[in-house]
Amino acid sequence: MISTFVPRLLDYHPQAVPVPYYHHNVDADEFLFYSVGQFFSRRGISAGSITLHRGEFVHGPQPGVIESSLGKKDTNELAVMVETYRRLRLTTFAKEIDDNKYMLSWSQS
Ligand SMILES: [Fe+2]
């Protein structure tokens, strides 16, 4: 499945939490390429970043991101996500540039 995240209005209810909730896809890997814009759901992400969330990996907003997103009306992010039921394998180059601290980003505020 290929999805796009495009500039859009966010949920504007006064009690809405506009960032994605914690989730995992049991059977699918999520590959995301961040192209342009402000990626407010994750710190440390910028244009050109790539993330890979394995199927069994629970992920969502980092500490403090929910609070900082409250009241946000829109987003200008542009990203592409590929979800695949076939496990992705890292190339040699991907292993060389892998940020091995990324998995710890959920425990850091
Ligand atoms: Fe996800």
Image: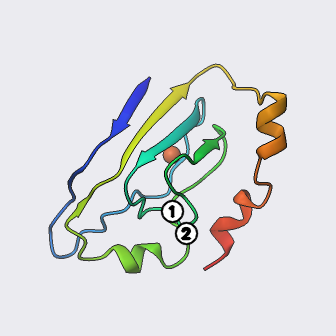
Q: Kindly identify the amino acid type of the residue bearing the numbered disc 2.
A: Gln
Q: Residue furthest top?
A: 86
Res 78 → quadrant:
top left
> Could you tell me which secondary element the residue under label 2 belongs to?
loop
Q: Kindly identify the amino acid type of the residue bearing the numbered disc 1.
A: Arg
Q: Position of residue 27 (x, y in %)?
A: 60, 29
Q: Position of residue 22 (x, y in %)?
A: 49, 57
Q: Pointer 2: what residue?
A: 62
Q: Residue at x 66, y 47 (%)?
A: 57
Classify 11 as above or below 36.
below
Q: Position of residue 19 (x, y in %)?
A: 37, 62
Residue nearest the observer in this picture, 109 or 79 = 79
Q: Residue at x 15, y 68 (%)?
A: 13
Q: Position of residue 16 (x, y in %)?
A: 24, 69
Count of numbered marks: 2
Residue nearest the observer in this picture, 65 or 90 = 90
Q: Residue at x 35, y 52 (%)?
A: 77
Q: Quadrant of the N terminus?
A: top left
Classify 102 as above or below 13.
above
Relative placement, left or right, of 10 versus 59 is: left
Res 12 → quadrant:
bottom left
Q: Kindly check if marks 2 and 1 are in contact, taking CB atoms under 8 A apart as contact.
A: yes
Res 42 label: 1
